[in-house]
């Protein structure tokens, strides 16, 4: 049973145990809610004995007190146990599931993120998990608990009269079977609605991210028109999906109620034939009305199972994606060697049979026209993707055999697209080394000239900089990125035009700071302005993903090949 729950609902081992407890306690709670029927049955029986059969003179008052206390305690404890096992542990399970999903996503190759945008992933982590969380805390335990409790109650009714029990229970499995027949149509409509809802989410995010160009190019009305069309489409699919609920549930609940008059008629026949006592008959009539409350909920829960099918499959798809794996290898040498490396997106090859070595203690620059493969090649060396063929080695070890996080601890990166967090400047720099002291952070901030603009801020290093550093200029954001890299002090440095957003006066100072940062380290520079790599130990010239030339700046200029053309073009401009 535990294995079935774990596999079907993607639960942890502990989560499946808690879910099983929840199912049992839900069943016990349903049974506890039926216990007042015992008090009613005893009252009816004694009333008949006193006023009709005259076999008894008084009610057994003490018995009712005891039965009431037992009923109250049973409902109270069953409710508490059910709440703790269903709700408290479910929220813990889904919180852990969110963390597990985030950790899994973190270890996926970047090719995954090329196929799924941010809105899609956010919808999975938050929206999908919220839907599954509701199913975990309501539908799953209540559904299976109802199945168990109704079965036990039916057995107890059958001990009183089998025919009435069959009349009461028979419509229930028939209703479940009919819902199963409509399952595919319902799930198709839910999937279509989910797709439209995702389009709306993606459009909202895209609009917010591009609000400046939308206003600048007067596309507000056009954007709102497109948004309205998406909302209309989503609304239609939502209505189409929801219409199945009343169309299914209303007739099926009516069908189940047929069991009530049927059971009453059969029971009356049994009573007139002397096969059923009057007290039992009256009690069973009352039970007919009460027993259908959990059954009604059970049908609604089946609909909810269909609703969460799409989110569950999307999440399962992510969990089944292959992670980038490897071993925690000890790296002593930080030469990066590429041997016949090829790589492509889908069927398009963008890196073609590239081989070179970036030596420790030297600066290796990647240059070439836009789209030549510079950034892609750097990301392959960082193992953001795994290559299609060839080998990339770090210190003689194939990086595909090194655990990604263990590999990245040897790298510092300063890219043009700086990623900052809505936190203080101090904490954004401390990302470079989480256990760094405030004094160490301030020291590297001075080297990277962050301290210059920080001193002008009212809260200095405790100033919050907004989402992705929106309150800072491009140059200030890039200097924080450089400070991070200096603080991390990794043996391998990747620089992507790290001074491109800095003015001319500060560029020289930053170059001096960077020169101190890169001493005795393996440095990979992605160069767009060729004057920034004039002193590089080796320049790799790329064109259409192929290595065309390599050498020093002087050697390549003298050669008058591809590098010379780029150099001359930039010089003239």
Image (cartoon, helix red, strand yellow):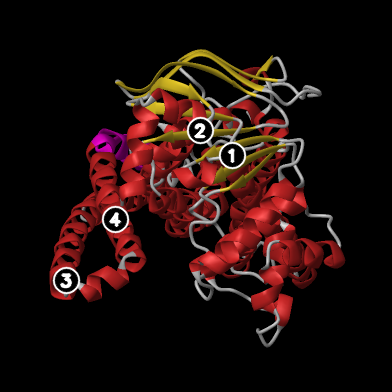
Q: Which residue carries the number 4 mark?
A: 197
Query: Secondary structure beneath disc 4?
Result: helix
Q: Which residue is more in the foreground, 494 or 110? A: 494
Q: Position of residue 367 (x, y in %)?
A: 44, 35
> Can I make out residue 277 in this image?
no
On the picture, is 123 further left or further right than 237?
A: right
Q: Which residue carries the number 3 mark?
A: 219
Q: Which span of residues is magenta-colored? A: 170-184
Q: Given this view, does label 4 or label 3 mark the residue nearer the observer?
A: 3
Query: Secondary structure beneath disc 3?
Result: loop
What mark, if any, has residue 535 been given in the picture?
A: 1
Q: Which residue carries the number 2 mark?
A: 553
Total count of labels: 4
Crowd around label 1: few <14 · some 14–19 · many ≥20 (10 Å): some
Q: Earlier in the sequence, mark 2 or mark 3?
A: 3
Q: Earlier in the sequence, mark 4 or mark 1?
A: 4
Q: Position of residue 144 (x, y in %)?
A: 54, 41
Q: Earlier in the sequence, mark 1 or mark 2?
A: 1
On the picture, is 346 further left or further right than 471?
A: left
Identify the residue shown where x is 23% and y is 70%.
214
Q: Above or below — where is 249 with respect to 155?
A: below
């Amino acid at each position: 049973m535990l294995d079935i729950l774990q596999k079907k609902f993607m639960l942890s081992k502990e989560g499946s145990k808690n879910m099983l407890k929840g199912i049992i306690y839900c069943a016990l709670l349903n049974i506890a809610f039926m216990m007042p029927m015992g008090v009613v049955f005893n009252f009816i029986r004694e009333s008949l004995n006193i006023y009709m059969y005259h076999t008894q003179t008084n009610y057994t008052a003490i018995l009712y007190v005891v039965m009431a206390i037992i009923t109250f305690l049973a409902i109270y404890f069953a409710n508490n146990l059910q709440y703790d096992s269903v709700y408290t542990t479910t929220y813990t399970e889904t919180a852990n599931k969110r963390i597990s999903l985030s950790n899994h996503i973190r270890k996926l190759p970047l090719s995954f993120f090329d196929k799924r945008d941010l809105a899609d992933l956010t919808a999975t982590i938050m929206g999908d998990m919220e839907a599954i969380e509701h199913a975990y805390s309501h539908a799953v335990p209540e559904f299976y608990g109802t199945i168990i409790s109704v079965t036990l109650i039916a057995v107890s009714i059958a001990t009183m009269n089998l025919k009435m029990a069959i009349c009461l229970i028979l419509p229930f499995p028939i209703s479940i079977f009919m819902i199963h027949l409509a399952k595919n149509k319902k799930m198709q409509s839910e999937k279509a609605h989910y797709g439209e809802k995702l389009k709306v989410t993606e459009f909202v995010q895209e609009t917010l991210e591009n609000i400046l160009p939308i206003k600048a190019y007067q596309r507000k009305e056009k954007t709102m028109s497109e948004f309205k069309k998406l909302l209309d489409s989503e609304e239609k699919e939502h209505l189409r999906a929801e219409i199945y609920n009343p169309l299914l549930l209303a007739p099926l609940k009516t069908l189940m109620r047929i069991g009530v008059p049927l059971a009453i008629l059969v029971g009356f026949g049994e009573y007139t034939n002397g096969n059923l006592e009057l007290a039992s008959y009256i009690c069973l009539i009352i039970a007919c009305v009460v027993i259908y409350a959990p059954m009604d909920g059970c049908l609604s829960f089946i609909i909810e199972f269909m609703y969460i099918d799409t989110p569950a499959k999307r999440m399962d798809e992510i969990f089944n994606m292959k992670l980038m794996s490897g071993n925690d290898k000890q790296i002593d040498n930080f030469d990066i060697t590429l041997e016949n490396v090829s790589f492509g997106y889908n069927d398009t090859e963008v890196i073609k049979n590239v081989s070179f070595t970036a030596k420790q203690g030297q600066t290796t620059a990647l240059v070439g026209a836009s789209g030549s493969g510079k950034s892609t090649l750097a990301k392959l060396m960082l193992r953001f993707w795994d290559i299609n063929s060839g080998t990339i080695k770090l210190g003689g070890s194939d990086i595909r055999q090194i655990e990604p996080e263990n590999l990245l601890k040897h790298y510092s990166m300063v890219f043009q697209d700086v990623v900052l967090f809505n936190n203080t400047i101090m904490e954004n720099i401390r990302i470079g080394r989480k256990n760094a002291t405030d004094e160490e952070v301030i020291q590297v901030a001075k080297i990277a000239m962050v301290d210059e603009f920080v001193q002008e801020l009212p809260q200095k290093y405790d100033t919050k900089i907004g989402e992705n550093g929106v309150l800072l200029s491009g140059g200030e954001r890039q200097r924080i990125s450089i400070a991070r890299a200096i603080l991390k002090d990794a043996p391998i440095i990747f620089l992507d035009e790290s001074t491109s957003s800095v003015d001319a006066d500060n560029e020289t100072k930053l170059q001096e700071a960077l020169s101190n940062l890169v001493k005795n380290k393996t440095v990979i520079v992605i160069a767009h302005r060729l004057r920034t790599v004039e002193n590089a130990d080796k320049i790799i010239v790329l064109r259409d993903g192929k290595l065309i030339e390599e050498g020093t700046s002087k050697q390549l200029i003298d050669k008058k090949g591809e590098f010379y053309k780029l150099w001359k073009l930039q010089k003239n401009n």
